[in-house]
Image: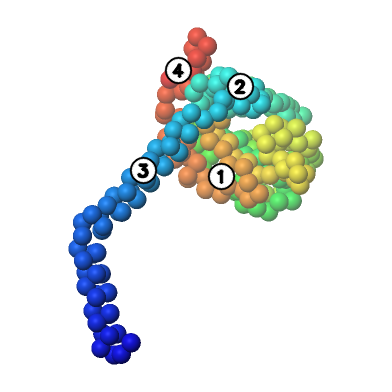
Amino acid sequence: MNCSGNAAARKRRSRNSRLFASCPARSILPLRFSVAWHRCEESRFAGKLAIGKAARDDIGKRPKLGDLGPFRWKPLSAPEWSLPTDGDGKWPFKDYRGKPVLVIFYLGYGCLHCVEQLQAFAPKTDEFRKAGIEVVAISSDSQEDLAKSIEKYGKDGGFPFPLAADPKLEVFKKYRCFDDFEKLTMHGTFLIDGDGMVRWQDISYEPFMNPDFVLKEARRLLNQTPVREVAGRTDR
């Protein structure tokens, strides 16, 4: 085929392409068919999902919702204790029933960070008492070492709040101020209201060093309506 023949063939193919592109039946219908086919497949797939299979019966026993937790949240109840002081007496927690108390767990007179914490809270003791809050501290020391703490670090021969000894760490563990994995005591600061409920807490490897924050938060929390149990349910 000569050059003129090739040119004529290219001209015919170009004309046929324009005719195909301008034909509605050839250009639009295939697109409509494709969209309709996809919609049909989607409907069939959705129908299969809707029909599904019967619910499995090997997922275990479903617990009742009431067994998964309380109907409404309420603060934890502070565990009771009775601990020796630096003297021969005992310090029972029940003596603070009916009034708020701030309890500080510290790691003995050998912990300098603990000493800094006690010395930070000591000057604020009167402000806490004016707010109706007592301050007490529980040490991992024995009674003998507790006396050393008071003698060595207390101002004017003592602290403005009582110190109690828990050398067996029984109360530390009750308040979760003990790392069961590392077998180490931890620092703890707890605000307990007059009903014996823990309203605020901080448990850490470092002592909480901000008494002004605790005092401000205590005023806010203790001014709220207390949570009580009434007729088997929790009401405010």
Q: Are marks 4 and 2 in contact (CB under 8 Å)?
A: no
Q: Position of residue 95 (x, y in %)?
A: 62, 22
Does label 1 or label 3 sit earlier along the sequence?
Answer: 3
Residue 39 - label? 3
Give the residue number, with chain letter if any, for mark 2: 63
**Alpha-carbon distance for marks 4 and 1?**
35 Å
Which of discs 4 and 1 lies nearer the camera? The answer is: 4
Mark 1, secondary structure of its residue: helix
Q: Position of residue 138 (x, y in %)?
A: 68, 37
Q: Position of residue 185 (x, y in %)?
A: 72, 43
**Which residue is found at the position 28% from the left and 79% from the top?**
9
The quarter of the picture where the C terminus appears is top left
Looking at the image, which residue sits at the far top? 231
Residue 235 - label? 4
Inspect the image, locate mark 4, and give the three-letter code of the amino acid beneath it. Answer: Asp
Residue 121 - label? 1
**Which residue is found at the position 49% from the left and 23% from the top?**
72
Mark 2, secondary structure of its residue: loop
Instruction: Indicate left or right for 54 with 89 as reference.
Output: left
Does label 4 or label 2 sit earlier along the sequence?
Answer: 2
